[in-house]
Image (cartoon, rainbow, N blue to C red):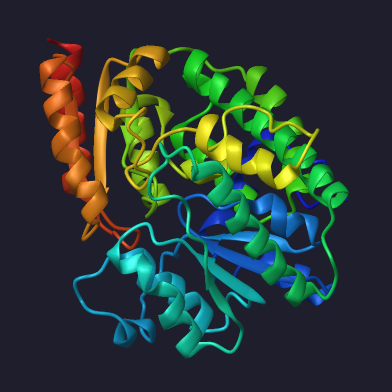
Amino acid sequence: MHIWQDRTLDEALAYCRDLVEDPEFPTVRRWRESGGKVLGHFQVYFPEEIAHAAGMLPVKVRGAPLEARVAESRFGSYLCSILKTSLEVALSGRLDLDLFVTMPICDAARNLAAVWERNLEYPSRILYLPQNANSAHAASYLRKEYARLKEQIEEIVGREVDADDLRRSIAVFNENRRRLRELYEVKRDTPWLVSADEAYALVAVGGLLPREEHNALLAAVVPALRQRPARKQDRIRVVFEGGFCEQPPLELLRILAQSCYVVDDDLLIGLRWILEDVPLAGDPLASLAEAYLEKSSYSPVQHDLRKPKEKMLLERIRRSGAEAAILFAAKMCEPGLDEQVAYARALDDAAIPYFICEFEERMTGFDHLETQLETFVENLLFD
């Protein structure tokens, strides 16, 4: 029986929040103690099905709310917090991995695997997602990258991962994505039933649990959310944009939820990157590659001319029925800060109000930000 079972809805949600904020990674530790192997992957998107098919626990490495006391000396002071705290949890022994994989999503992350491998005993690898998603050769190239990754994973686990293994894992993750879409339907259609921080915890815990357990958790919690005895309040509907890599503190999302209904967002978008079921027939690696390119969301770190970021944000606002946008960017995040400028210009042209701010995962003291948000919301409500 899982820890969250036979608990009330509020207790299950509290369990998820506690797991997400716990820098000791207790679920990963229990997995290793039972003899399992762990693959840690950095933001934004990673094909977790491949690690899952090999019997590994794929863990999303997304930093932690702690001081990077040891890792600070391995990086320049001008880099974003998530790089430092991610390495910190590894160096301090809080997160013990068998393989670490990163993607070159920015100049800083491009060097992360090398820094990781110099400081830790297990291997670190880079997965090169297509730089030109519009190339006719992008899918075949990515399929080869996935095959290379599979071989590296097979070396770690000591066995071959065949097509049937991959298909079984794809089926598990198809269910997971469906259940996450159901959660976001609740956020969009009845946002008074689930707050921004609750929904975030329910998504984020998926990067810490075996995905079968996450599916069971969502299967129990989402129907319970729909039955929650909560009343609609007079709050503005907003879209949160800027959570594709470094994650805001849960306390920041709690503050946001006190003033607004967050009806859509790009928080942990990598866990929800693929928007449809991946086909089980045919070559599973080719199907995963095709889904990444053709059935996916958008992000500042994927360059796809078919998905201009400003247009996609406006579509997200329109589709969710939002009245305003909350534009956040992590401090020292070049892709995020660059997109803020483009987003703000597009929102101005569309006459959509927005609130803009920087954050970092180790933020404390939110009084000033809370006051600014309250003023922004009050101006909209009484305009």
Kindly identify the residue that appears in the image at 71 percent across and 59 percent down: 51
Residue 120 in the figure: left or right of residue 75: right
Closest to the observer: 299 or 351?
299
Closest to the observer: 88 or 165?
165
- Locate the C terminus and report the quarter of the image it occupies: top left
Kindly identify the residue that appears in the image at 67 percent across and 71 percent down: 152
Closest to the observer: 267 or 3?
267
* Residue 189 picture location, percent across and down: 51, 13
* Residue 40 picture location, percent across and down: 59, 66
- The image quadrant of residue 73 is bottom left
Single out the residue that lies furthest toward the front: 136
Kindly identify the residue that appears in the image at 60 percent across and 43 percent down: 289
Reply above or below: 283 against 322.
below
- The image quadrant of residue 196 is top left
| Residue 254 visible in image | yes
Kindly identify the residue that appears in the image at 82 percent across and 41 percent down: 6
Residue 178 in the figure: left or right of residue 77: right
Closest to the observer: 314 or 5?
314
Reply above or below: 57 against 194.
below
* Residue 286 picture location, percent across and down: 67, 43
Reply above or below: 93 against 221.
below
* Residue 371 picture location, percent across and down: 17, 38
- The image quadrant of residue 9 is top right
Residue 44 in the figure: left or right of residue 148: left
Reply above or below: 107 against 205.
below
| Residue 11 visible in image | no
Q: Looking at the image, how many numbered discs can be counted on the residues?
A: 0
